[in-house]
Image (cartoon, grey):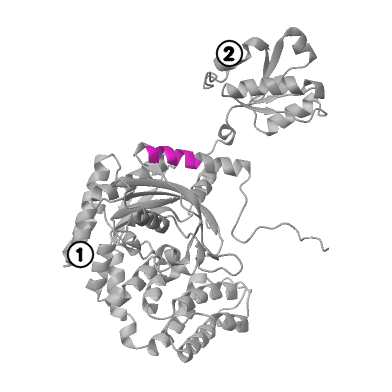
Amino acid sequence: MSKPGAPALARGMRDLLPLEARRHQKVTDTLRGIFERHGYAPIETPALELEGTLMGKYGPDAERLIYRAGLAGESGYALRYDLSVPLARTCAMNPALTKPFRRYQMAAVWRGERPQRGRYREFMQADIDLVGSTGVLADAEIIQIVVQALQALGLPRSLTKINDRRVLNGIGRFAGMPAALLPGLYRAIDKLDKIGFAGVRQELLAVGLSGDLLNRQRQAVERWLGGKADRATLEVDLAKADDEGVGEAARDLAIAAFLDALSAFPQNAATPLSEARQTAIQASLDVLRSQTSVDRIIPSAVTERLLDLLALRDRPLPLLDALDRRLDDAEATAGTADLRRILAVLDAVGIGEDRYQVDFAMVRGLAYYNGSIFETVVPEPPIGSVSGGGRYDGLIGLFGRDMPAVGSSLGVDRLVDVMVELGLFDDPDLIPPTAYMTLFSPDDAPAAAARANSLRAAGLNVILATEPGQGLGQQLRSADQLGCRWALIVGPDEVAAGEVTVKDLRQSRQSQVAEANLLTWLRREVAPQIEEPSP
């Protein structure tokens, strides 16, 4: 029988060893306390959902990332992509839940994304949702909880960007965007932070064309400049793009134009990535637009009007006033009115303008949002959004009786990554006060186990040495490496004197304590948080 290969992790997955796991636990414990303080209750949903439960809820870009699952001969299952759609299914299946229903859930989700810093294929989300309320006070409460949670975690700076899908719809109509292409508008603008206004302009010019080809072209430019692929390799990869209705002949012409333009940039040279992308992708778009019916693409003038409105910047209320003056759109006006009400609540609870910003270019790419939307970023270190959410009044209705809902997700893994980089964890303090009960010989094992058990029953964390062959020095080193605060030493001398030597491993000092008084001494001197033993 052949030997198995070296152990390895699946791409985008990782182990959390004790220190990393304790950091995650610190974050989730803090979030749980904030959620519970606002009256939110925990629920759990399964990792595996019916494929039909998930598909058709997020939009095509997101649904490409959903992991299908099943045993041999089975199909129709998928790993959850987020916690919101499973919540919608749960609410539809349990209509008797008291409304408004406030829930939180912390659990892993799975997405087949390209792994990179701050982005994993399996990661933990912490969700809060308020189901059954149409009032903007619910929206403001969710935003308030997110801001206060980040403050409780000690993040010195965070900025919550706030917008409304109705406002975006109004901006699209004002610019002349065909209604059928509005979903493409959302997907394009949602990439602003990644690709900038120049990239969004290209995305908008490509709406109605092949979005998959555009994504592959972005990656192809990077591979070409880095010398990781030649023209023939890129041509084969680009030809695999889902053309989304674009004719094969037009696609092939566009790929050739893209590669011709790209070949003008030498490989392994100091060429700016943005310049090469702009030039090569534009050449492709020019061909595609020339080969596509005008009713399937956004006119260039519409794109420029859109970008002009999306680039508006000011303080929140003056910015909303400026947009209202330019738009004559009832739906957008309803959206800006609700945004004003949300901002008034944030101001009333002490959340100032240094913590939020109205941003018309903030989209939230998932298809189910239909009202207020919000996303929180940490400027430094730059790692993307750490939370995002909004109102999704129509989602639960896809499973039956409709219910209004609003909620947000916080990315636990990204929060941990940010906090590590900012030095916000005091790693020794993550380990609860723990004692290490030493062991001198196998004959001492029953008495040592009894002592350790007595202290555990009183509320103290105790690790019992299980290797009697180790000398005392080696045991003390093990205790220190495990992060234990105290070593409890009961050797022959201590037994004869009826004492325990308590060694403080952090402060390198020790005390002799009568064994009968050990628990009292520990409570008084070093662990007053220990509870009285249960009767």
Q: Position of residue 237 (x, y in %)?
A: 57, 80
Q: Secondary structure at mark 2?
A: helix
Residue 374 in view of the camera: no
Q: Position of residue 144 (x, y in %)?
A: 32, 44
68 vs 372: above or below: below
Q: Can you tell which mark lies on residue 439?
A: none
Relative to 241, is 141 on the left or the right?
left
Confirm whether the magenta stretch covers residue 35: yes
> Mark 1: few, some, or many residues within 10 Å (few <14, many ≥20)?
some
Task: Determine which residue is flagged by label 1.
Answer: 331
The residue segment tinted magenta is 27-36
Residue 150 in view of the camera: yes
479 vs 70: above or below: above
Q: Position of residue 201 (x, y in %)?
A: 37, 73
Main SS class of the magenta portion in the image: helix
Q: Using the rendered view, name the quadrant where residue 205 is placed.
A: bottom left
Q: Can you tell which mark lies on residue 520?
A: 2
Relative to 9, is 50 on the left or the right?
left
Q: Position of residue 32 (x, y in %)?
A: 43, 40
